Amino acid sequence: MADQAQSLRDLARGIRRDLGLGSLVRRSRIWAVTSGKGGVGKTNFAINLGVALRGLGQRVLLFDADLGLGNVDIALGFYPRYNLGHVLRGEREMEQVVEEGPSGLRVVAGGSGLGELLELSPARVREFTGRLASLEEMADVIFLDTGAGLSNTVLSFALAADEIILVTTPEPTALADAYAVLKVACQRQPSVTFRVVFNRVKDTGDAVAAAGRLNAVSRRFLGREVDVLGHIFDDPHVPRAVCRQEPFFTLYPDCPASRCVEEMARKLTGLSAGRPKGLLGFFRDLGRWAGGGGEE
Ligand SMILES: Nc1ncnc2c1ncn2[C@@H]1O[C@H](COP(=O)(O)OP(=O)(O)OP(=O)(O)O)[C@@H](O)[C@H]1O
Ligand SMILES: [Mg+2]
């Protein structure tokens, strides 16, 4: 039955492509959540923003794209049996790798598949993308929770996404590392779009001051303004929820951190961004960046 449905979807896609209707096909918007310094709150931000967006009617898929230390599953307290590697090796269908997480969040574990993804030949990418189309049909928004830092893997995932959400705390070391990511990404792709989230701020003034510092160096050395998505207060409800392996947004919807996340979710849904490149565009660009290429 599932095979039959898949064949029909493949057929419909083929027809749309043959008729040149590709531009009418719905595409997911892909946000890479990344940081310079590790441990600044990327995974918690991605999970809770995802839950908040679900509450606003968006279908959200969280993709654990941390090659070394993926931990979305641990943060959410469930253990996926399969990851992208199984799909790439033809052992499982994409639908079997998508786990239903809490609060309606869908999760895909990258696992061993991430390294393989970066090494796919263009022909294999095309083959794989056909199987990925089912993902596109189940998500309006896809968050990639990447690792921290400036490795080629992290940068490739970040640059291949539609936009980058750069998470930092207001600490000088975290700000310096965030600036390093901004700089390298802008050098590699001048048209890259960033939105910055200041996590664990004491108060609004703390967030404004941190944004001012990052903006000053960005304006001076990169000639561009930093676009601030928002801030999240340092809030004891966050580690409490982490210990219970549940999103703080679900456990404590009225806590200060949840209110900040809700505000950002509303801001993101209200954005009039351009047409997303979708998964096909994402995987095309991922191969290009991972292979050391640039914009064509
Ligand atoms: N707003 C916050 N208030 C209080 N504590 C926070 C907040 N955000 C994150 N934390 C704490 O920081 C820890 C690390 O967060 P998280 O795992 O989301 O970071 P990360 O950037 O994904 O780390 P890594 O680089 O290892 O992937 C959490 O376990 C949590 O206890
Ligand atoms: Mg993380």
Image (spheres, rainbow, N blue to C red):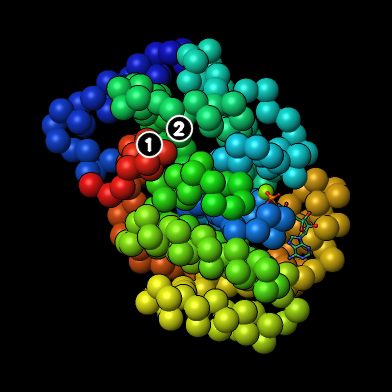
Please determine whether, in this image, residue 61 is positioned above or below residue 220: above
Q: Position of residue 134 (x, y in %)?
A: 42, 30
Q: Nearer the viewer, mark 1 or mark 2?
A: 1
Compared across the picture, whether 243 is left or right of 105 comes to right
> How many C-alpha atoms fall within 10 Å of the one at disc 1: few (<14), some, or many (≥20)?
some
Q: Ligand 1: which quarter?
A: bottom right
Compared across the picture, whether 154 is left or right of 198 comes to left
For badge 1, the amino acid type reads Gly
The residue nearer to you, when weighing 236 against 171, is 171
Q: Is mark 2 within 8 Å of ligand 1?
A: no
Residue that numbered label 1 is attached to: 291
Q: Are marks 1 and 2 in contact (CB under 8 Å)?
A: no
For badge 2, the amino acid type reads Leu
Q: Is residue 129 visible?
A: yes
Residue that numbered label 2 is attached to: 118
Q: Residue at x 46, y 64 (%)?
A: 183
Q: CA distance from mark 1 to mark 2?
A: 8 Å
Q: Position of residue 279 (x, y in %)?
A: 38, 39
Q: Residue at x 51, y 73 (%)?
A: 228
The residue nearer to you, when weighing 172 against 165, is 172
